[in-house]
Image (tube, rainbow, N blue to C red):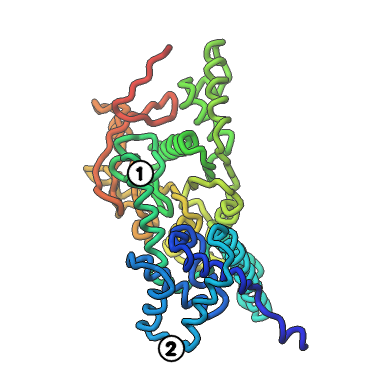
Amino acid sequence: MDELLNRQMPHSIEAEQAVLGSILIDSRCVNDVILLLSVNDFYLDINREIYETIVSMFNNSKVIDAVTILENMRSGGNKRPNLQSYLVELMNITPTAANVLEYAAIVRDKALLRNIAAVSSDMSGMVFGGVGSAGDVLEAAEQKIYSLRQGRSRGGLVPIGEILPSVFSHLKDLAQNDGKLPGYSTGFPDLDEKIMGLNKSDLILIASRPGMGKTSFALNIGLAVAKKSAKTVAIFSLEMSREQLVLRLLSGESFIDNKKLLTGKLSDDEWRKLGAAAANISRTDIRIDDTSTLTVSDMNAECRRLDNLGLVIIDYLQLMQGSGGKVNYSNENRTQVVSDMSRMMKIMAKELNVPVLCLSQLNRASAERSNKRPLLSDLRESGSIEQDADIVLGLYRDDYYNTETESHNLAECIIMKNRHGETGTIPLQWLPQYTTYASADTTHYEE
């Protein structure tokens, strides 16, 4: 019992003092430390209060030294009697400011151990409290551990002063990006210009009637991201097998008629092209899961295990099961189920900090209008899909409805919603023999 009472959470008073002492000796240390440590990483109250003052002063571009920190803390209502002598002590016991990053790493490691202990305690509370099923507890544990692995705290209210440095760091990166896209390129320049690429934590919806080519469009985007970013692209296909998806990728990459790939009757030149296309695709890190009974939780769990994740593609929304499977939802309204899944996908995009691109069917309302171009209201079992999505793209081909049209194989990507900017229509070229899309001004010439 005495051992339990005397047990303390992991911390290093010496490392905390050395970090603060380094900043007092050389205020230039703040630039590096503030990106590594948050206020809650400090265990002792007095150290936490001093660091919180330093962060606030840094954000307000104030001079940081022992005198100014003392004055700011006093004016802020801190009445600790030994504050002045403690600040002097911090400078005296710190050997050098040159090792500040090593000191900060120790503080961060101890804080991480405390967070792990807190998560463990939460999980024990859920187990012994009978809160949820084993799957619910496991999902909560995975989510919290993943957050810790990504260097994030377990949540709570964060002072705006701690958020500002990361915002300015992001703005600085954008300014140094020489006008490049802030997000991943879709491979369609006109679309990139409108939506600013695929940005982290965004939920992007691609909607169309069946057979319009939304899977091919998503594969175009996935391959472009995998090639240009060298990131992992995770594709979850609930409709098509992984072999079918790879055949489509090969057809579009090699410009070999998809029908020939289905029969295997290729010329020597086509075999050469196919080999070159396969080599190009194999250099990317595209991973495909074609399990037809996946839930959002399943996908989230798989993605958390990927260290270099850049994009998630889900094909498609209406085929997915709710988190509890079909049985649990047998008496529920399907619209509510789909709404719950769309909300979970938005949370997944935010948690993984990557764009999530999800395909969705349109209902038949668009086919019954004279103008058959998709509208947000056409989203099948829509519920809150259009609310959760940051960007909603609709695909339209006039020859899909009218075989006599002059706009043969011409397509439109209609931006129906865009939280990052304007809406509009992007012209595209549909190449049916290769089951792929291309920019309207792109023409393929045989060698």
Viewer-closest of 307 and 75: 75
* Residue at the (27%, 37%) spot, across then down: 426
Q: Earlier in the sequence, mark 2 or mark 1?
A: 2
Task: Report the disc number at residue 116.
Answer: none
Would residue 248 be visible to someone looking at this image? yes
* Residue at the (44%, 49%) spot, across then down: 355
In the image, residue 437 sits, relative to residue 344, either above or below, namely above
| Residue position for label 1 | 176
Instruction: Classify residue 419 as left or right of residue 26.
Output: left
- Percent x, y for residue 53? 42, 74
Describe the element under mark 2 as helix, strand or loop: loop
Q: Are marks 2 and 1 in contact (CB under 8 Å)?
A: no
Q: Quadrant of the N terminus?
A: bottom right
Instruction: Classify residue 234 as left or right of residue 8.
Output: left
Kind of residue sitting beneath label 2: Lys
In the image, residue 77 sits, relative to residue 98, either above or below, namely below
- For mark 1, does the 10 Å Cα neighbourhood hold few (<14), some (14 to 19), or many (20 or more) residues? few
Would residue 237 be visible to someone looking at this image? no
- For mark 2, does the 10 Å Cα neighbourhood hold few (<14), some (14 to 19), or many (20 or more) residues? few
* Residue at the (37%, 63%) spot, across then down: 164
Q: Nearer the viewer, mark 2 or mark 1?
A: 2
Describe the element under mark 1 as helix, strand or loop: loop
Which image quarter: residue 60? Answer: bottom left
Task: Report the disc number at residue 79.
Answer: 2
Which image quarter: residue 285? Answer: top right
Viewer-closest of 283 and 38: 38
Q: CA distance from mark 2 to mark 1?
A: 44 Å
- Percent x, y for residue 111? 59, 69
Kind of residue sitting beneath label 1: Gln
Instruction: Spot the residue most to the front.
Output: 92
* Residue at the (31%, 32%) spot, across then down: 428
